[in-house]
Amino acid sequence: MKIIKNILFHRITYLVLAFGVQLFLLIGIILRFSRYFVYFYGFSVLLSLFVVVLIVNKSMNPSYKLAWIIPILLFPVFGGLFYIMFGNYRLSKKSHRRMEEISTQINFLLQQDNMNLIKSLSQSGSAACQSMYIQRASSFPPMADSGTEYFPSGEEFHLQLLKELSKAQRYIFLEYFIIQEGKMWNSILEILKEKAAQGLEVRVIYDDVGCLMTLPRHYDQQLRNWGIKACIFNPLVPVLSALHNNRDHRKIGVIDGRVAFTGGVNLADEYINQYEKHGHWKDTAIRMTGGAAWSMTLMFLSLWGFLQDTDEDFAVFYPETKETVLPSDGVVQPFTDSPLDGETVGESVYLNMISKAEKYVYISSPYLIIDNEMITALTNAAKSGVDVRIITPGVPDKQIVHAATRSFYPALLRGGVRIFEYTPGFIHSKVYLSDDRFGVVGTINCDFRSLYLHFECGAWLYDVPALSDIYKDFNETFLRCQEVTLDQLGQNPLKNIASAFLRLFAPFL
């Protein structure tokens, strides 16, 4: 009875009912107009045709266009109207102005002397081009005064995070897609409460959908009661809207502006294998110091200011001290990706790394739902003699998404790409490594949601010592994987039809 009661009175039950009622009323209104069938049908067809033309001329990915166009043409009475209501979200002029104001402040605070940096990057023309693109598209410049430390597991990241949180003297900023009460979060929360009681500025951002099943309602108010400032990203309200698709998938931890973390690890127990949700959970993270940590600080503050709609002088958070970083530590360039600016920064960074690789490209991603551009880049690299390898989960967390992932295997395998499934369980890390010199560690999955719909972040790495640790981790992980071949996939006509259907509507998964 307790389980049934919890289900009946859970927030998600109310949301599902509310969405269902709205959808039912919308369909009912449309059917009501069916008495004027000739006029209504004609209007609906014209509207759907107009929407199709609009979609064709929009600067969005062709796969995403196709996923909308086909159902609109199949169901012209509903299709055009549904796209206008749920697929055509635009940011208000006020929000655009607010974003521009925040971006201007960030650009001013990130101005620096790049002479040493230019000298470092000039040794590799591809590095300079990649860095220039990231700065122009994401506003965050390369940093030559930054240290890095790579963590090949969520457990190691957790221990280091606790250590750094305990040393905080001015402020702590945490921004995570998922936070769940348990050993991991409780150990962090105790430090946050202690630091807040000491007068430190402690702020937390969490995504409402990400935490829908992991945190109680109004948990932000509970945090405030402990002296912790809290903000919920894009609260899920019971109104049908395309805006619900845009989630904050970033993972950012900042301490005093001197140390910052990002990677795939959320603040929940499965990420540190306190319990096996989908077998052994393999994840990664990176610790940054110096200028890169300051960039991550501004990354957090920019979203906080946008969500809170407050004017704040970010300069007051400039770190009082920075950890000493050796000149040989290479270049680190944090970057962010937003679905609101029309620029697919994450995918462009990935494509640039793949297309410029000469020896190898190693990729780790929990999902592999990619567009034609990514397939072409991967297969062209493999056909050119580059050793292209991709690691995906052996134990899925979502069956239909894993089936969609596997539907992309044949095209990649035929193009010479090698695919490895992590047999002990679920791999959640999002890491790219190329030619011992370039790498990305961040939050961006190889799927449409991460590449086009979510707020994401990452760290682009060039000639930093951490790259050797990433290379070692990849090679150790390959040994725990099963390589997939075309023969293993087999030739099942029904399965092939299902795969084709999944690939067509993959952008919606």
Image (cartoon, rainbow, N blue to C red):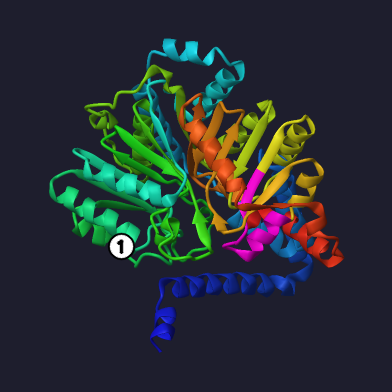
* Whole-percent x, y for residue 457 in the image: 47, 40
Relative to 400, 442 lies left or right: left
Is residue 13 in the magenta section? no
Q: Residue 269, how many percent across, how many down?
A: 40, 61
Residue at (62% x, 58% y) in the render: 394
The residue at the point 42 percent across, 32 percent down is 100
- Quadrant position of the C terminus in the picture: bottom right
The residue singled out by tag 1 in the image is: 219
Image vertical order of residue 326 relative to residue 248, above or below: above
Query: Going by the image, does 262 lie left or right of 371?
Result: left
Magenta-highlighted residues: 390-406
Q: How many marks?
A: 1
The correct choice, above or below, for 232 with respect to 23 in the image is: above
Q: Which residue is drawn at 61% across and 58% down?
A: 423
Label 1 secondary element: helix
Res. 332 image quadrant: top left
**Type of residue at label 1?**
Tyr
